[in-house]
Image: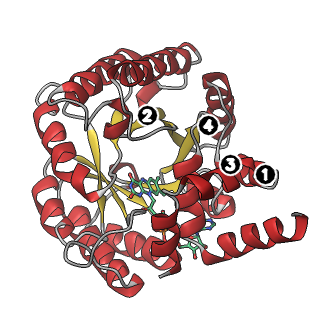
Amino acid sequence: MLRRVLLAASASPKLRQLIVSAPQTRAIVDSYVAGESADDAVRVTRMLRASGLLVTLDYLGEDTTDEAQAAAVVDEYVQLLGKLSADGLTQGGAAEVSVKPTAVGLHLRPGLAAENIARICAAARDAGTTVTLDAEHYDAIEPTLGIVGSLRESYPDLGCVIQAALRRSEADCRSLAGYGSRVRLCKGAYSNDDSVAFVAKREVDLSYARCLKVLMNGSGYPMMATHDPRLIEITGSLAMLSGRKQDSFEYQMLYGIRPGEQRRLANSGAQMRIYVPYGGDWYGYLVRRLAERPANLAFFLRSLGSKS
Ligand code: FDA
């Protein structure tokens, strides 16, 4: 409930101003975000790779409102991939990129986001790595999966994200579980109406477990994006039952969340990928992280109250 209220309230310019200008915000942002520049992203990638972790990088920003801005986002990704490649970090897909379709023009004009994503895919291919398209608001899901379907003819390793919170997702997993298909499964960070989504946490968790089973029993490459200990344990059991080798699926977690568990899984021989956001446009990302954990939000509100 609190989560839904915060996500809805986050559109308010007043709340945005309060959060962005509070001095206490910086420390929280720094714990979740690698820094402002591509060089910061490369530095953090190097550090994570040295600990045996895989990486996916997200240039922060969403809901781009003009074509020039969308083109600038594409240029940023192309440059980032060049830098990662020059440092030997993209080899074998060790560091890849995650892209939000609305950041590259999904809602601007038909075809624009697909053209822009194809440019990023071409740069990723040149660098020897892959692209995964993030899942955003409900109205972006169908067009995003449409782009994945069409671009996979040229870029079969283009990955997509399924949000277990959506009622449609188990069926989406069934159609995406085929050979070579890279699918990241997450719970879903957006607020949706219960006509299209499960709202209760328990229902979302059960849906995640059902989707997980479909993907692990399929012949694609599942990427389990969760910090939830029970779902991580279920993933391990399903891998054993389905005879999957460690290199045929991976775990994924967000930068700054449960780092001890990230290392534990990597040290156990599992593939563990860290989602590393960077850039100046961190507001939407921060609000989603605060909203998914009441303890984070309470800590943030207390610190605002005590210093103001
Ligand atoms: P849950 O929220 O139940 O958390 C389980 C445990 O993890 C908590 O008890 C706590 O210990 C820890 N934890 C979780 N969130 C925390 C936080 N913010 N701070 C501190 N501890 C925390 N969503 C989306 O809609 N579209 C997308 O494309 C993506 N992409 C994506 C990529 C990757 C790699 C990850 C890990 C996640 C996403 N997400 C996402 C976000 C996802 O949908 C979800 O909101 C978060 O991962 C939190 O859900 P959990 O599965 O971790 O479970």
Instruction: Answer with mark 2 or mark 4, whichever residue precedes in sequence.
Output: 4
Residue 253: % across, % down: 52, 56
Residue 75 image position (x, y, % from top left): 43, 16
Vertical comparison of 245 with 59: above or below:
below
Q: Which comes sooner in the sequence, label 3 or label 1? A: 3
Q: How far is the residue under mark 1 from the one under mark 2?
A: 25 Å
**Can you identify the residue that label 2 sits on?**
97
Indicate which disc, 1 or 2, sits on the residue closer to the N terminus. Answer: 1
N-terminal-most mark, 3 or 4: 3
Distance in Å between CA atoms under marks 2 and 4: 15 Å
Label 4 SS: helix
Residue depicted at 44% across the width and 33% down the height: 96
- Where the C terminus falls, by quadrant? bottom right
Residue highlighted by disc 1 = 27
Between 44 and 3, the one nearer to me in the picture = 3
In this rendering, the label closer to the viewer, 4 or 1: 1
Cα separation, mark 3 vs mark 4, equals 31 Å
**What SS does tag 2 mark?**
strand
Q: Which residue is mark 4?
A: 49
First along the sequence among labels 3 and 2? 3
In the drawing, does residue 17 fall left or right of residue 153?
right
Dot placed on the residue nearer the N-terminal end, 4 or 1? 1
